[in-house]
Amino acid sequence: MFSYLIRRVLMLVPVFFAVSLVIFLILHFIPGDPIDNLLKVGSSPQARTEMEARYGLDQPLPVQYGLWLGRVLTGDLGTAIVARRPVADLIAQALPHSLRLGGLALLFSSVVGVGLGVVAALNRDRWPDRAIMGGVLLGSTMPGFWLGLILMLVFSVWLGWFPVSGARSWQALVLPVLTIGLGGTALVARITRVAMIEAAGRDFVLLLHAKGLSPLRIQLRHVLRHALIPVVTILALRIGWILGGAVTVEVVFARPGLGTLLIKSLSQHDYPVVQACLLMLAMAVMLGTLLGDILQAAMDPRVRAALG
Amino acid sequence: MSALLELSEVSVSIGRAALLERISLRLEPGHILGLVGESGSGKSLTAMAAMGLLPLIGGRVTGGTVRFDGQDIAAMTDGQRRALRGRRIGFVTQNPMTALDPVQRIGAQIDVVSRLHLGLSRQAARARTLDLLTQLRIPEAAAVAEAWPHQLSGGMKQRIVIAMALAGDPDLIVADEPTTALDVTVQAQIIQILGALVRERGLALLLITHDMGVVAQICDRVAVLYAGRLAEENAVDPIFAAPAHPYTRALIGCIPQEGMARGSLHGIPGAVPGALQFPPGCRFHPRCPQASALCRATVPPLTPHGAGIAACHHLSVEAR
């Protein structure tokens, strides 16, 4: 098991390099550069050349990539060109907001999603199931930013229950968490339901009934236990997705966070910041995948046996 | 002696398909009743009916009564039926490979039965489990109890399933093709174990099988099922010495005999029809060498035949 973990972590290394290369290239192929944002209107070409030299933007791309990667690997994310502050500071300021939002959204979609999935599976093809699955379909087809605007309109503008934007109070977290969480809830509910129905049809469940166990105990202690294996894996994979998905929602609700920082820096072509933000999101996806694999092995002895 | 398990004219349907028609069986304590027939004849369904588990597979009893120890199972509450299962009726499944919960350790899966039904503490239940495993000649019982199902062989898993069936100290064991999924060498061991349990503990065993060899080995009586109907029921000796029903004869013809000439092993041509294509008259007539116009038109009634009963229009001819 331990050797598997080592191998699994080592596999992330080439992925990390590939991701960093893609991030770097895409960013530098976008037309425009950060100098445009720094120069005053009517500056001379010399001023521009000086500026480029100062930030190393006059070097060939492979050299720039090499230098950046070297710094990142030694823990130095560089200095923001436009914002003129260490990138690490900007990230350290934004990340807690995003983690709080993403974490709560993930918690919400896990608890509510699994709950709804269980209720739907236990009432298969009866009205609670149909109602939940109908809602789930609605929830999973609605884009996050649109759902955010609707929630804002109803609960903030009309009802006045929650603030429209900002991050000053816990109330301000409610709508953003719901906006991100509802889509995940729909996904989790659907997977839980299908996984429970599939598990309930397995041979060993018949024997549990033959042993005289109560149906509810069989469903919750055994069937749900099996259904949670794929659900937990999906939830872990969503960790990165939720942080990335928070981008639009943070902008809609005007919240500080990785997403807002990313969008702002992107519009200013502030390369070091954008690169750092994207790298953070990519790492979140990679760590989520790793966590998913570990949890699966933790929950299923057969997986552990296969991994050796 | 009064019957421990008694099915009287039990009919079972799943959806619109009438799968069992007026099945009557009787099983007394200390006896082994073999329930034989090909796949699709309704054997497993009969077992599910006996255990009150039909709703689980979407089935329902449409006629007749199932009595356990004199009590009508249909008249019981869900809770009363649950109190029978695992406690007074142990169940041994067809495929031990998939019968155990793959994410629960072996010991816990057996412990739960005696904790639930006998009210034993965790420690007492484990002690009982280890004792059962030892009785079933499982080496290193303590290690096996801590193992996961995927770490055991098929034969070992079937012993675990038998231990589970015994953990509630039952009066009846229903074994649904307990050896079908196992290697031949292991099959013999499992049959031996089941036979010994009946002798030593005075259990009743409803043994579902399509293997007439197994029947000859340990059963007291045999019920032959064909396409959801009882074809013949009798004590094991007359069944083998003078089978009354052509289907029983055909099943016996499928057992290899010592000194048999090469190539003389018989199969039964055709297959059991599906529930929606049951032919009129005697359901066996399309495959029966003796089928006549009467067989094609009229359902043969179950009539006494020696110490048993059989449903065939040609009994009088055959019984000579």
Image: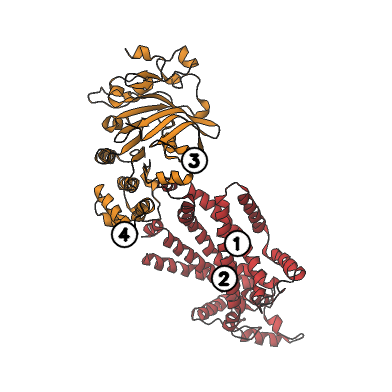
Chain colours: A red, B orange
Mark 2 falls within which chain?
Answer: A
Label 2 – label 4 distance at C-alpha:
41 Å
Mark number, residue A103: 2
Which residue appears at 57% of the width and 74% of the height?
A99
> What label sits on residue A4 in the rendered view?
none
Residue A261 is situated, as x and y percent measured from the top left of the image, at 64, 77
In the picture, the disc for residue A184 is 1
* Residue sitting nearer the eye, B121 or A48: B121
Residue holding disc 4: B123
Give the quarter of the figure containing the N terminus of chain B: top left
| Amino acid type, label 4 | Gln
Taking A278 as reference, is B226 left or right? left
- Nearer the camera: disc 1 or disc 3: 3
Q: Residue at x 30, y 19 (%)?
A: B242
The residue where tag 3 is placed is: B57
Q: Earlier in the sequence, mark 2 or mark 1?
A: 2
Q: Position of residue A217 (x, y in %)?
A: 47, 53
Q: Can I make out residue B173 in this image?
A: yes
Quarter of the image that includes the C terminus of chain B = top left
Q: Are marks 1 and 3 on the same chain?
A: no
Query: Which of labels 4 and 1 is toward the front?
Result: 4
Residue B305 placement: quadrant:
top left
Please state which amino acid type lies under the numbered disc 1: Gly
Q: CA distance from mark 4 to mark 1?
A: 43 Å
Local secondary structure at mark 1 = helix
Which class describes the residues within 10 Å of circle 1: few (<14), some (14-19), or many (20+)? many
Dot 3 falls on a residue whose secondary structure is helix
